[in-house]
Amino acid sequence: MKYEGTVVQVRQETPRVKTIRVSWPGIEALQFVPGQFFMLSIPGFVNQAGVQVRRAYSIASAPLDKGFVEFTITSKTPTGLSARAHELKVGDALSLDGPAGHFGLKRPVKDIAFIAGGSGVSSLRAMYRQLLLEGHPGPITLLFGFHAPEDFIFKDELAELQRRHPNFKVIPTITTDDPAWTGKRGRVTELIPQLFADTKDSDFYLCGPPAMVEDTIKTLAGIGVARHRIFREVW
Ligand SMILES: Cc1cc2nc3c(=O)[nH]c(=O)nc-3n(C[C@H](O)[C@H](O)[C@H](O)COP(=O)(O)OP(=O)(O)OC[C@H]3O[C@@H](n4cnc5c(N)ncnc54)[C@H](O)[C@@H]3O)c2cc1C
């Protein structure tokens, strides 16, 4: 389905990441599975051949976040749609085509672990928000790896969600050498054996860059997680 949306809110998450909230008349009828994406285009933003530029962006909000959808976009190249999306202001138009994609929350789930690399956290946000808003009773863990402390997307929101939901545990980890950081250090793969060796029967949802996702699958397999319990999206 195609929708003509309007930007209703813009939030700066980190120096290179913004969340764009979009709405349109009749959005209440929209149905999607957390993990799906839309193809986005900005009216008038065309390539050198004059063709409308379209890129895939995961829906970062949950179906229970009624009345809008959100996209969390990392500015990649100065000439790309992502950089153009960072210029969007409240009231600007944005075209959407979707929702699409097979990466989605499977049911029923009990114990569930999300493992994110960088801005890959945005599609997982749709899933953990949905579970928390539904009142999912089991443990939900988010292991979130990124470069430096300033790259901690959704930092304040995750702290608040943890305060409100005792079953939600967030484990951020950085790969730089920042002396002020008091949390975990190292790649997510280095932390997996100690964190998940006793919870191999969880469902694992991964999203991030290709190398991170492939290494994470191998590491999970190495501690005995069954392949059918691992779901992934790669950008
Ligand atoms: C299913 C799916 C979901 C996605 N969800 C998200 C999301 O939620 N958030 C998000 O931020 N992204 C997401 N992406 C990625 C997104 O679709 C775009 O690929 C990304 O935003 C880059 O698009 P762009 O037009 O800005 O850059 P493009 O111009 O398409 O450039 C893409 C890459 O090409 C290379 N490149 C391009 N031009 C040059 C150049 N001149 N010199 C050198 N290298 C160059 C760079 O490596 C650059 O990173 C998703 C992708 C998929 C497939």
Image (cartoon, rainbow, N blue to C red):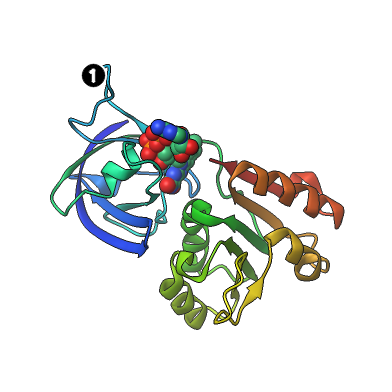
Which quarter of the image is occupied by the N terminus?
top left
Of residue 108 and residue 48, the one placed in the foreground of this image is 48
Instruction: Report if residue 102 is visible in the image.
Output: yes
- Answer with the quarter of the image where residue 204 lies: bottom right
- At mark 1, the secondary structure is loop
Q: Is mark 1 within 8 Å of ligand 1?
A: no
Furthest residue to the left? Answer: 91
The residue positioned 60% from the left and 82% from the top of the image is 182
Whole-percent x and y of residue 52? 27, 24
Whole-percent x and y of residue 53? 31, 28
The residue positioned 61% from the left and 48% from the top of the image is 106
The residue positioned 40% from the left and 53% from the top of the image is 63
Whole-percent x and y of residue 210? 63, 41
Q: How many marks?
A: 1
- Answer with the quarter of the image where residue 202 lies: bottom right
- Answer with the quarter of the image where residue 97 lies: top left
Quadrant observed for ligand 1 in the rendered image: top left
The residue positioned 35% from the left and 59% from the top of the image is 65
Left or right, 4 with respect to 123, comes to: left
Instruction: Report if residue 56 is visible in the image.
Output: no
Whole-percent x and y of residue 131? 52, 63
Of residue 16 and residue 172, the one placed in the foreground of this image is 16
Of residue 104 and residue 26, the one placed in the foreground of this image is 104
Left or right, 40 with respect to 193, comes to: left
Is residue 162 placed above or below 147 in the rendered structure? below
Residue wearing tag 1: 50
User: Of the residues shown, which amino acid type is indicated by label 1?
Assistant: Gly
